[in-house]
Image: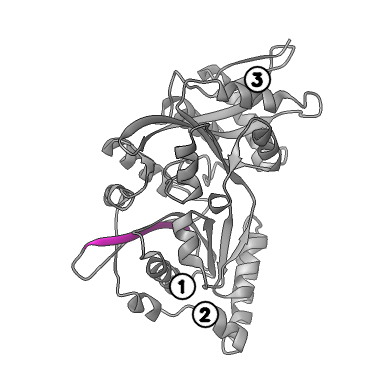
Amino acid sequence: MTQIRPLEAGDILRVAALYQSTFAGGDKRASPQLADCLRAFYLDGPGADGDIPSLVHLDRQGEISGFVGVNTVPMLFGDRPMRVAFAGALMVGEPRRDPLAGARLLKAFLSGPQDLSLSETANKTSLDMSKALRGAAFPAYSLEWMRAFTPTAFACDMVLRRSRLRTAVLPIARGIDGLVRHTGFGKSLAIHPSAAGKANLLTRPVDAVTFADAVESLTAHYALRSGWTKQQLHHVVTEAMDKPAYGQPVALVASRGDGAPVGAFLYHLRPGGVGRVFQFLALPGRESDVVDTLFADAAGRGASGLRGRTQPALLNGLLGKKAMFANASSTVVFSRDEAILDSFRTGRAFVNGIAGESWGRHIGGDFG
């Protein structure tokens, strides 16, 4: 008979192997660094909660055959504290042998004592299971956006980002972009540094502590927002900056002339490649200006484009800026509280990124 139980320290090596085969592909063995990272995130980190644990699925032989990682985030809905649990890294070793294992894991997760359950990484299979369990997906939180600055280099980096050919081919692609730079198509995509000046915002690079402080001030207007302590939030941002597979972190705060912050963003960039935007923040009404500032900063650093996950505020700022959109994974909410669901419908919920799972180093880490 199959069984589901909480994750234990002794399970980590098997979970790491399952993670490697599910998300990294190939026959490569999971590294000790990956196992250490999963242990730190799911058992030792600020998102680990003994009352709402990550779960393993045991087959009839008692071997681990599935896993769902659980990350808890303290949040506030208005003034009401809430324990919010995010389900991620849902994986089953041999789904054909036991096609219901994933559904059992998800159902067991939902039966926990958390006040609100979410997932920000639901693929098509997980989305179908979630809908069957009364989960609601919200498109404004579930799209991947892309904006090319130099189209040939952008396409090259997207296609070859994990290939050894990238280093050799990318300079050729950038040379082609140089030839079409003065054409109508090239001019329509180009981002000029003056765009930041037109937004009348000043930017300054910041460390994890200062960025975390900006998160608090720039998310205070949300109905549902993270309630990390300062120490926890500093840890989360520090971890989010360390994603070597995506490149070097770039964290900036955008302010008015009097120094008052109106936005902030954190992205990662490999030389000449497509930057990955991890977190975007803007005060209401300033979204477009902060997007312009983000684009100008990335283009000035030689990025061939940007990509990231949408949030309603960012989606508003991207309108009219030649962005492309796709749905690779979805944000799903499990709640019967109409007030909470309405905060998602109206874009007044701050989730994904820092208030989610993707800040963990297992996403974007380089584990050899």
- Mark closer to the chain start, 1 or 3: 3
Q: SS class of the residue under badge 2?
A: loop
Q: How many marks?
A: 3
- Residue that mark 1 sits on: 299
Residue 148 in magenta stretch: no
**Quarter of the image where the C terminus is located:** top right
Q: Which residues are magenta?
A: 260-268
Q: SS class of the residue under badge 1?
A: helix
Dot 1 crowding, Cα within 10 Å, few <14, some 14–19, many 20+: many
Front disc: 2 or 1? 2
- Mark closer to the chain start, 2 or 1: 2
Q: Residue most toward the top?
A: 1
Q: Position of residue 56 (x, y in %)?
A: 61, 21
Q: SS class of the residue under badge 3?
A: strand
Disc 1 to disc 3, how far (Cα)? 46 Å
- Residue that mark 3 sits on: 57
Disc 2 to disc 1, how far (Cα)? 9 Å
- Residue that mark 2 sits on: 190
- Residue 18 vs residue 252: left or right? right
Q: Amino acid at mark 2?
A: Ala
Q: Amino acid at mark 1?
A: Ala
Disc 2 vs disc 1: Cβ atoms closer than 8 Å? yes
Q: Amino acid at mark 3?
A: His
Which quadrant would residue 35 be assigned to in this image?
Answer: top right
Mark sitting on residue 8: none
Disc 1 vs disc 3: Cβ atoms closer than 8 Å? no
**Quarter of the image where the N terminus is located:** top right
> Which residue sits at x=43%, y=23%?
49
- Residue 160 vs residue 339: left or right? right
